[in-house]
Amino acid sequence: MEKTLVNKTIINNYEEFESYLGKEIGVSDYIQIKQEQIDKFAEATLDYQWIHTDPERAAVESPFKSTIAHGYLTLSMLTYLWCSVIEVRNVKLIVNYGIEELRFQQAVLVNDRIRARISLNSIKNLRGIAKIQIKIIVEIEDQKKPAYEALVTFLYHFE
């Protein structure tokens, strides 16, 4: 395994994945959550709650004094964050298998910046398919509590 110039972890096979068991795989760069992104997510999901989509009302009525990102918007960024940390080569198929122990812990306010801290929680060889479970902690810049934590399982079908 190696790190690229952008600090991605490169995994070529099961054994290289396994070497990260119980260790941090990487930390993504921060990405800012903007109102336009929140509004597009509201449109895509038909979730137009004012706390997400009405900055004027949120400034007055919200305990955050700001709009906040949908929790599921930040969750939907999980694949992007994961793929910004790791590049798995020699794979013919990747399957999103499940999410466990998901806990939203703190609201992400408009213009907050989030990043992911990812470690390998478990790995199993299922007849040539790597079943990996990562622990992902999505941090908010300058905040002690994360936006969320979860255990996420992927299946990697190596060539």
Image (cartoon, rainbow, N blue to C red):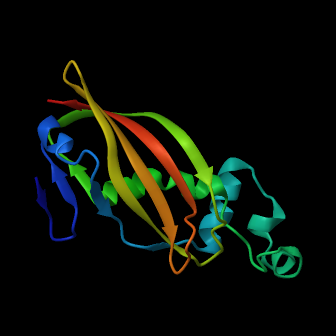
Residue 90, picture quadrant:
top left
| Residue ID at (50%, 48%) | 150
Q: Is residue 1 above or below residue 56?
A: above
Residue 66, picture quadrant:
bottom right
Residue 109 visible in image: yes
So how many labels did they put on this image? 0
| Residue ID at (70%, 57%) | 42
Quadrant occupied by the C terminus: top left
Q: Give the side of residue 133 with respect to residue 60, left or right.
A: left
Q: Nearer the viewer, residue 20 or 158?
A: 20
Q: Nearer the viewer, residue 141 or 144?
A: 144
Residue 13 visible in image: no
The residue sitting at the front extreme is 22
The residue sitting at the top extreme is 127
Q: Is residue 116 above or below residue 152?
A: below
Please provide percent x and percent y for residue 35: 65, 73
Residue 41, picture quadrant:
bottom right
Please provide percent x and percent y for residue 23: 27, 53
Q: Nearer the viewer, residue 91 or 106?
A: 106
